[in-house]
Each structure stands twice: as C-alpha cells, then as structure tokens.
Amino acid sequence: MDPIRKLVSERLPKAPAGPHPDADLLAAFAENAMPKAERKQVLTHLSACADCREVLYLAFPSLAEAQKVFVVTPRRLPRLVLRWGTLAAALVIAAVVFVGTRRQGLFQKEARTGSQPPAAAAPAVSVELKAPAEMDEMRSRGYAGAAGTVARETRADKPAPEKHMTAKLQAPLDFGKSDQVRVATSPGAELSANMRGENRPVEGRNESELYSVRGAKPAVPAQPTTGSEKDDKAFKLARTEGGHGLATGVLGGTISDSSGAVVPNAKVTAVGPLGARTESTDPTGKFAFDNLVPGSYAVKAEASGFKSTELKQVAVLDNKAANVQVKLEPASTTEAVAVAVSNQAAGPKTTAAAETVTVTAAPPAVVAQNAVQLGEEQTVEMTRKKSRPARMPAKEKAAKTPVVLFPQWTLSAAGAVQRSLDLGKTWQIVRVGDGVFRTLASLGSHVWVGGDGGVLYHSADSGRTWMRLTPSVAERKLSADITHIEFADPLHGSINTSAGEVWTTTDGGQTWQVK
Amino acid sequence: MPASTPGQSQPAASVGGAVLEDLYRGSLAAEFGFTLESFSAMLEEIAARHDSGRDLREFCLALRIEDLVLARACAAGNERAWETFLLRFREKLYDIARQITREDSSGRELADSAYADLYGVRTRDGERVSKLMFYSGRGSLEGWLRTVLAQEFVNTYRRQRRLVSMEQESEDGAQFATAEPEAPVAVDPRLADAIDEALRTLEPEERFILSSYFLDGRTLADIARALSVHESTISRKVERLTKQLRKDILKNLARRGLSRRQAEEALAADVRDLTLDIRASLAQDSPGGAFSEKRAKAGEGGT
C-alpha cells in the first residue's frame, strides 16, 4: 500500500469546524446549484466531517448504486426437480409419439374414419394443447404429476432458448417481501428486439421492424382484468397508435352504486401531473378522459346521494386505456375517503389487477393502491400464458401478483449506454446516438441520458426508440456537459450542467427554464 | 464569500416587483393559497435565514420556487398541495429509503418516520410543525428529501450503535472505558507537520476527495457523483494528488532540515514499503549507464 496514503489518512482533518450544513445546503451542493464561494465552504466542512460525507453519499448514491433494485430473487424450482421433470416430459412425448405411430400402423382404417386426427401428426403440440380435463385424465392414468407443468414450461422455454432469462422470470417471484413491483418489457418481445438489431442505431431501424417487435407481444388485452367488454370499445380509439412524440393515455371507467347499477351524471375528477379535469358520466355510467399525459392520477367520483369516493394512484400509460370501476355507496354522512398520511405510510399494496381497481367507500385503508405501470410493459404472468386463451379465469388472476420488471441501466466507463434485462447479470450496449454520456436517469420505461456538450436523449419505451432533446432557453442552447439528470415523473425533471446551471422542465423536455 | 451586498434584510422590494410577481405567477403559489404578500414574506425569510450575502434578486431567482411553494403549502396544511406532494414523492420516498437502508423493512420504517416528520405529527404550542417548513428551495425538493432521509438514517444508526456499544461495555465490565488511545501518529513530529502543511495548501475539494477516497473508501464513481463531475476526472485527480502530496511533503521535510534520503525514509513508514522503496530508488540510482560508460572508458584506455 502506498505509504503516502497511510500517512495522509492519519493526518487528514477529522474534526469539522462550525455547524453541520443543513439538508437544504447539502442538497444544493450535491445538485451543483450553489455559488462557488458557498460551495467551497460546504466542501471545507465536508472534507473534515465524516458524518456529513456519509449523509451525502447515502442521499446521492452513484448511478450504479442507485440502480441496485431490491428485487427478491425468484423462488426457483430445485434443479433436480427440473431435470427429472424434463425427463418425464420427454418420456411423455416419446410415449405419445410411440403410441400414435403404433395406432396409425395397426389401426389405420380406424384412424382414417375416426373423427380424431392422428396423434402422430403433431405429437408435441397435442401434448401441449391438452385441455385441463385431459391433463387430469393423464395424471389419473399414472403419468408423472409434474408432466403437465413441465410440458408447459418446456414450451415456454422455446421462444428464446438462448437466454435463460425467460425461464427464470416465469418462476413465481416473491413480492411479499419487497412489495415492489417492477414493470418490464415482456422478455420475449424485448429479446426479439435485441436480436433484431439492438446494435444498430435507432435511425437505422425501420418502422415495420419496430412494429414487428410489438407484434411479438402476446395477444392479451391491455387490461389484464375483468373490464367489461363494452368498456374496451370506448378506449379503442386511443389504444392504437404507437408513434413518436409525447404519448398520451386514456382514463375511463364506469361508476356504479353498491347494487351494481350504473350512476349517470356523476361528477368525475381526475387529478394528474398537469392538474385536474372534470367529466360527468353518461347515461350508461361511463366516463373517459382522453389525451392524458402518462402518469399517476387520482380519480374522484361524486354524485348526489352518494358518498364521494376517491381512487388514488391510478396509472395512465402511454397509448393505453386505464379502466376504473368505481362503486359508490349511499351517503349516510358525507365521508371523504381522503387517505390520511398514516394510512399512506402503510405503503403501496400491489393488487393483482394492475389497472382496474374496484373500490368501495369503506374505511380508507381499503383503498387499493395499484401498481403504477408505465410504458407498454406487460406482466410476466401474461407472457407465460401467451398461447393460452387470452382471458384467464378471474380467480386465477386474483391469486397472482403481476411480476413486472424494468430493464436496468448504467453507463460504461467510455460513456456508452448499457442496459440489463436480467437484473444486472449481463449488460448490453444500447446505441443511443452520437456522444459520450455521463449520466442517466430512469423512471419506469422512461430513460434519459445526457453527456458531453449538452447531448440529451430520452426514451419512453425502455430504450427501443430514442429522441434527442435540445434544451434551449431564449435561443440559447444547452451546450455545457450534463452532469446529472433527475426526473420526478416523465414531465418534471431537472438537469445539472458542468457550468453549474440547473435546467428544469415541467413538460417532458419541450420547454426549459434555466437557473 | 463575496461581501458585495452586506444588507441581507432588505425589503422584498429589492427583489424587484416585476420579478417577484413573475416568480409568484410562475409557480403554483396562488393555487396553493399564497397571496403575493405571504409569498414575498416567505422569500424574505428564506433570504434572511441563508445569510448568503448575495444579491437578493439573484438569490431568489436561483431558488426552486415551485418546489418551495409546494413544501410550504404542505407545511401549512393545504390539501391540494399534499395531494400533489404525495403524487410526486410518495413512491419515491420509499424507493429512496430502501436505497439508503438497503433493506426493505427498515427502509419502510425510515420512510414512515420521515412521513410523520413531514406531515408534522409533533406539535409545538398546540400547532402542528411540519418538517417541510425547513425546506428553503436551495436544492430540489427531492434532493432535500433524500438528504433528510439520509440524515435521519445516520442519526438513528449512530444512536443504535451507541446503545449497542454501551451494552457491550457493561457486559465486559468495562464501565470506565479509557479514552480511545491516540492513533499512533507518525513518529517524527516534523513529518506530521510536513504532512499537515501539505494538506493545508490543498483546495477544500481536493481534501474532500482524499477524505472520501482514503478514509471512507468511497469509489471514484461515488465521489464523481457527489461533485457532479465525471468519474475519470476524479481518477486523474486522485492520481495527481497523491503524487503532488508526496512531492510537497518531501519538500516540506527538506525545509525542516531533513536530507533527501532521510525524508524518503520518513515517508516510507512501512518497513516493507521502505525496502521496496530503497530497491526502487537503487534501481533508479544505480547508474547502469555510468557504469557502462566507465567500462567503456576503461575499454578505450585498454586498447
């Protein structure tokens, strides 16, 4: 070890002079938003005060630290079970093939005249498509109990055999511990995007390619829940369209009373990042807000004779319709379901229904907090059920928590943007545009990267497409190096520059203010 | 610190009526129940609190007015402000707390206690006191929240550590623990002086980097983030600083009457380092060239 280091460590001042800087000053310091002289004062204190340094480093961790997500590792089936399971599945398939060929050979006539197609024509498929009843029959006939599940699993493996991720994510993730829901692009779609041309610059990719990636998504409706079929129609208009620019979402739903009858003419207010909007329900009890910026909304329903009911944290996604069912209870006394902070503190409760929540105006604690999903991400749950009928029985859905994961992001030492789809095990370089990137911020599917010379890119879809932002104020373009990016939501963000300026936006980067 | 404008308690008029009004309109102040008067009073109070000696107008323009208004409105109990605050920061607070504690349940605990403080569970003279009152818009509200959480964590952690150590002490029967023995300082007081002097000439930022890197064991990336510069800059700086310190200390030692060799030896505190150093310096000093020259000369003389 360097002796200098040892000696210097011993002599470095360890007793801070003067009072500790308050949180305000430390924050301003970390955000590079204070004049030089004051900054020097804070630095003088920090250089001698281990506690304040600790606070600073805890509060403003480096990118790699901040990206560490608290994801509880999925409970995996023991390897032994998988191995035996695969073997069992292989045996089942072999048996079916064998029996099929035999039947075809021995009872050809019967096979021709019979209404059933010969099993040998597609032995593997026939195993997979067996209806649950047939599966039960198989089990009762003495096939390995695991055969059903394993057959399904091996099938699920097939779309992307070269990556193990698919299989891993399909294991049930335990969110009981973390309560944190991460939304992720469906591994299948994401991987195909990867294979199709991840390493080509975005400009090089044509639309059809991008859409073909989208097409790879399972044909599951945007709302994984039991929204009535009729409701879907109302949102169809806003559902499609996946182009560039700021995407908008739709928030709609039905207001009904406790008996289930719709409530026409109820006043519905949606409070979101850009303020509040009010609509009334139509004669069928439906309401819809279109052209909403994606984000988290609070929906309040009021009607005469009913308690007003509020639904917090309704996620409105890009190009998707959020469907809300609100049940109003008759008003005995006017009781606002404003969730008190003490209840808020109980933390987010993920519900199985990611976007549709039914709420009664019962005690505040009952208000279901739904997971905020951004972007066109799907639950892993859905990808597993890809080839099954799109609508699952409601019971099954309610029992499962959607497991959703965002990609993770980091920057290489050389300033390239890297993305990980497997919780940081492997990283791929994502070509964003020209420039050396120094800092990035991610928020759900939104990613911003900034770097030397004021280059700033934004992606709203986990890095599939990128858009360059050129912050400018009154003809003056941002040209200093970007040292830090922070976004509270897709619209409100700030950038710190090496020139010590702070650029802020409240509209997703269309207009900027500089300080 | 520039002492250009000594009077910090100037009336808000010096901010400039137009500017003040701009700021007022630009934020959601009116919506959150501020009047122009209460708004300007708030700015004045903050400017007074941060006796920055800067031009008041400049100071106010540099504030995060929007965040500030939100925080103050929340502190005052404005319902809409709370709604907005929760919408923006609720999830984030939990995320940050989890990041700080690196553990889910204690992260939750930390965030919950922070919420209680922010909401103002404690009362003073019958009035709810919200911690948000202390935010003054110098940095972003999120940055402030991060710092508050980190401070809370460091404080709690330290309390717990103290409790544990007391318990341990009584268990060990060492109730009158002697003060921790002074770390063995470099033997030669002249060396200590020389190092101190070299450190004093450094910029605060350079001392900060050294403390973070040497004492706290922070990574280059961490330090870069804290100073808003690129990692490679810090890496270069650390390298340059170590070299420069070595040179400065040697120079200071020489001024204190040590010979070059003595100074080098004093610096190489570790015996192993010393031998290495000597070997290195021998290798450097051993004048291979000179020797061969001599030989060459001898050869010349011979022929």
Image (spheres, coloured by chain):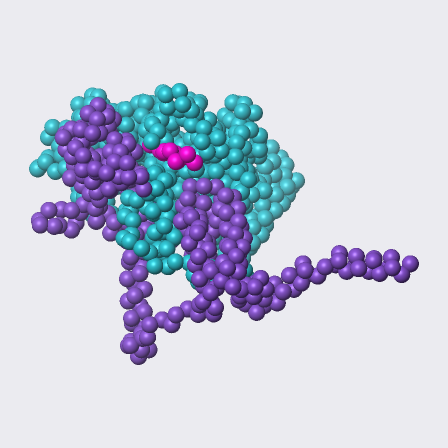
Chain colours: A cyan, B purple
In the image, A257: left or right of B238?
left
Q: Residue at x 35, y 29 (%)?
A: A514
- Give the farthest residue toward the right: B303
Q: Residue at x 44, y 51 (%)?
A: B202
Q: Residue at x 42, y 24 (%)?
A: A477
Q: Is residue A78 above or below residue B174?
A: above
* A147 falls in the magenta region: no
Q: Is residue A434 above or below residue A179?
A: above
Q: Quadrant of residue A98?
A: top right
Which residues are the magenta region?
A491-502
- Nearer-the-camera pick, A304 or A128: A304
Q: Is residue B165 above or below residue A30?
A: below
Quadrant for the C terminus of chain A, please.
Answer: top left
Q: Residue at x 52, y 52 (%)?
A: B244
Is residue A273 visible from the viewing direction of this image? Answer: yes
- Nearer-the-camera pick, A66 or B271: B271
From the top left corner, tell me how far across and down residue B157 is, in percent.
31, 59
In the image, A325: left or right of B201?
left
- Nearer-the-camera pick, A387 or A311: A311
From the top left corner, tell me how far across and down residue B172 is, in percent.
33, 78
Q: Quadrant of residue B196?
A: bottom left
Total marks placed? 0
Is residue B94 visible from the viewing direction of this image? Answer: no
